[in-house]
Amino acid sequence: MTWALLTVVALLLLGALHRERRRTQALQAQLEAAAADLQHLQEACSRLAPVGVVQRLIADGAGAGAERKVVTALFADLVGYTALSERLEPSVLARVLNGYFQRMSDAIHDHRGHVATFIGDGILAYFGALQPNPWQCDDAVRAALAMRGAIRDYNEELAAQGLPPLAVGVGIHRGPGLAGLVGSRERTEYAFVGRTVNLAARVQTLTRTHQVDILVTEALREHLDPRFVLTPMPAETVKGIAEPVVTYAVRE
Amino acid sequence: MANALHHVAWERCLLEPRHDANLEAYARRKMGVPHPAIRYFVDCPWLARALVDLHAEYGLLIRLDLHLGDLISLVVSQENSCRYCYAAVRTLLRIQGMSEARVQRMEQDLTREDLGPKAAAAIAFARTQSRSVPTVAAREKKQLLGAGFDVDTMKEIAFVVASTDFMNRASTIPAIPSRRVEQAPDRLRVRLLRPLIARVLEAHRSRGRPAPPVGPAAYPYAGLVAAYAGSPIAPVLAQTIEAMWTSPLLTRRCKLLMFAVIARGIGCSACAAEADTTLRGESLTERTLTQVLTHLDAPELDPVERVLVPFARETIWYEPAPLQRRARGVREQLSGPQFLEAVGVLALANGLCRLGAVLADHA
């Protein structure tokens, strides 16, 4: 009688143990699936925003405060894009553009910049926005030189496919502004707001006037390694800026 | 099961392990178990010793809960994407009896579910110090003190973060292999012996006791030692910093330049000022020094300095694999011991400058 009772109790316990084990396994599987989902989500986020911004969002939350900073802004634009877009099939144009954006982004990322946004065929990148970077001016100019080299290599690839070459104009300026997550309830992005970005964009347009590919402002040149070879350009007035803007072409 | 850093790309190791019975015995005596990576650091004795001595859980903490110290190490290693250190802390937690599911819950939500407000404040502070923007660190410090920690406990937390930052870089720059440590908790031998290993580890982990004050010192960054007067951290920190400065593998000037670059990159003005002042006595003109620190190169530097000065800034914020690829380029231009000492100096400079940023009130 006692043995039978003990056997029943043991069987009940074994059954409960088995059920508990299966439940734990199911929970572990759910946990792994959730972790995998999270991983995929983070990877997807990384394609929509710079990795540093995603990390900052994860760490500080959407409420991370904005702060005043001195940042170097680099604005790059394709020269003759409109003519190019009329000549190429949409699918070919998209492939050419994606190759261009990838190479430019790599050059910027390799020199510790982060691409803030693509504006049409333009690229806006910052140096020293996400983390303090006392060497941001040198980094931005080195990135621009790497972009020049990358365009040269890309043009060789395009020529081999019978496609027209690309040319890029780059404007770089250093100055203060407000860095942080800004936007509406529906859409927020990590941005740098201020005159610095506008001036970098305006200086980029001067690359056409001066027939050069990389221009930096006087404010940037003051912080630049003197070993960079620069050529002074005539001062020009640009839209939205009262004083004529003095720029320097970067040779090497 | 994969841990939170399993996806982090990790290059092939840049160092060759070498057997050193005395050093291995020293690590085993202190930690109770063999140090899984000490063989890689044999060629730079002060660095190898520091990797053992700066572990806070072996008698360096008087006030901070040792378990919270482990969590801080876990978080900082996660912040720094150090696969090796992260796996080591994770393995330690598993051996101490924490289930895989609980460790995973902690990884996913270290600031909310599993922690009380005080521990959560400590974790938030640790994260900020590791990222180290000094003004933000000062704000977090106030929050930490507001959460109920006293100043001495705050300093112990800051030390745990700094020593973890040091160990993370010492392991990440040369890409110390992480796989064995990652797999350790699931090995049959470890699972069978887990209670025994846990007891051995527990027997060696101990709370610290107040230590007699360290005598006045003239080497750079001695001020950080002074900040821990009376704590067992002070003599260990003093010994490590002094041994680093006196080691002959790299010149003192080269080490100072690396410290100066890292202090600047982190934004710790007090640490940068200390390095600058000392560098003025090191046969560099003011003009050259300004050129080096603002542009990371000058023709007046010697060949080793010209390699290490620009590399120093790479170690401040990094992704492991690109950093390790750049480190491979550096390794090819230096002797093995020089490279190893450079790894140690860079790792220590990152830890100490982050510590300096917290202790020096940069608000």
Image (tube, coloured by chain):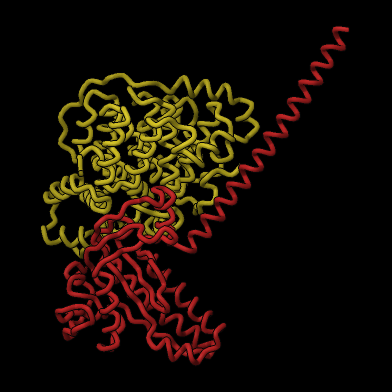
Chain colours: A red, B yellow
On screen, residue A141 versus residue B120, left or right, reads: left
Q: Is residue B247 visible?
A: no
Give the answer, above or below, for where B200 lies relative to B317: above
Q: Quadrant of the N terminus of chain A?
A: top right
Quadrant for residue B305, please give it.
bottom left
Q: Quadrant of the C terminus of chain A?
A: bottom left
Which residue is painted at 24% across and 41% down in the image? B356
Give the answer, above or below, for where B281 lies relative to B39: below
Give the answer, above or below, for where A223 lies relative to B214: below
Image spot of residue A118 (x, y percent): 41, 72
Quadrant for residue B139, please give it.
top left
Q: Nearer the viewer, residue B24 or B230?
A: B230
Image spot of residue A185 (x, y percent): 42, 58
On screen, residue B299 versus residue A26, left or right, reads: left
Q: Is residue A125 visible?
A: yes
Image spot of residue B45 (x, y percent): 35, 38
Which residue is painted at 12% across and 61% down in the image? B287
Image spot of residue B251 (x, y percent): 24, 49
Q: Nearer the viewer, residue A44 or B195?
A: A44
Which residue is painted at 35% across and 64% down in the image? A113
On screen, residue A7 versus residue A98, left or right, reads: right
